[in-house]
Image (cartoon, helix red, strand yellow):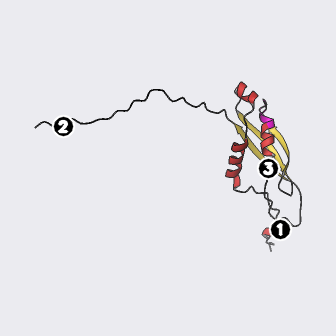
Amino acid sequence: MKKERKDQDFIKKPEYPGGPKAIGEFIRDNLRYPDEALEQKVEGVVRARVTIDVSGKVVKVDVIKGLGYGCDEEAIRVLKLLVFKIPGNKIRKGFFHQTFNVTFKLPQPKQKPSGLQINYHYTPSPKKE
């Protein structure tokens, strides 16, 4: 006979309030494009492994695949700002690991509005009888 495991027997993974979508928004809002990367027009993805402690704080970030030009350091800085919620793990305490991709995409230049604006208005001529 197979013994059923209860939900309380498993270690709960850390959760970010709002889920993955909220993590993406947080990273986009707090990420500052490094000046050197802007000058060199560097784009790409920094892949990093994050270590989360039992209180939900990011204690270590290891870059798996970097871009250089200051992007790696910026990804580490932003990922260390994340704070996770750890569901009650009564028995086991330890560290959790999660992998993130931080995307660096050059900002698009804003288009200048042209100084000339033309509006057309059509008025039909009255019918002749």
The residue beneath circle 3 is: 98
Which image quarter holds the N terminus?
bottom right
Q: Residue at x 67, y 51 (%)?
A: 21
Amino acid under disc 3:
Gln
Task: Of the two numbered discs 2 and 3 on the same chain, state the one appearing first in sequence.
Answer: 3
Can residue 37 be seen from the camera position used here? yes
Callout 2 touching callout 1 (CB < 8 Å)? no
Q: In the rendered structure, does residue 48 fall within the stretch colored magenta?
A: no
> Mark 2: few, some, or many residues within 10 Å (few <14, many ≥20)?
few
Amino acid under disc 2:
Pro
Q: Residue at x 70, y 55 (%)?
A: 19
Relative image position of residue 98 (x, y in whole percent): 79, 49
Callout 3 touching callout 1 (CB < 8 Å)? no
For the residues labelled 2 and 3, the Cα–Cα distance comes to: 73 Å
The residue beneath circle 2 is: 126
For the residues labelled 2 and 1, the Cα–Cα distance comes to: 84 Å
Which image quarter holds the C terminus?
top left
Q: Residue at x 77, y 43 (%)?
A: 78
63 to the left or right of 23 = right
> Mark 3: few, some, or many residues within 10 Å (few <14, many ≥20)?
few
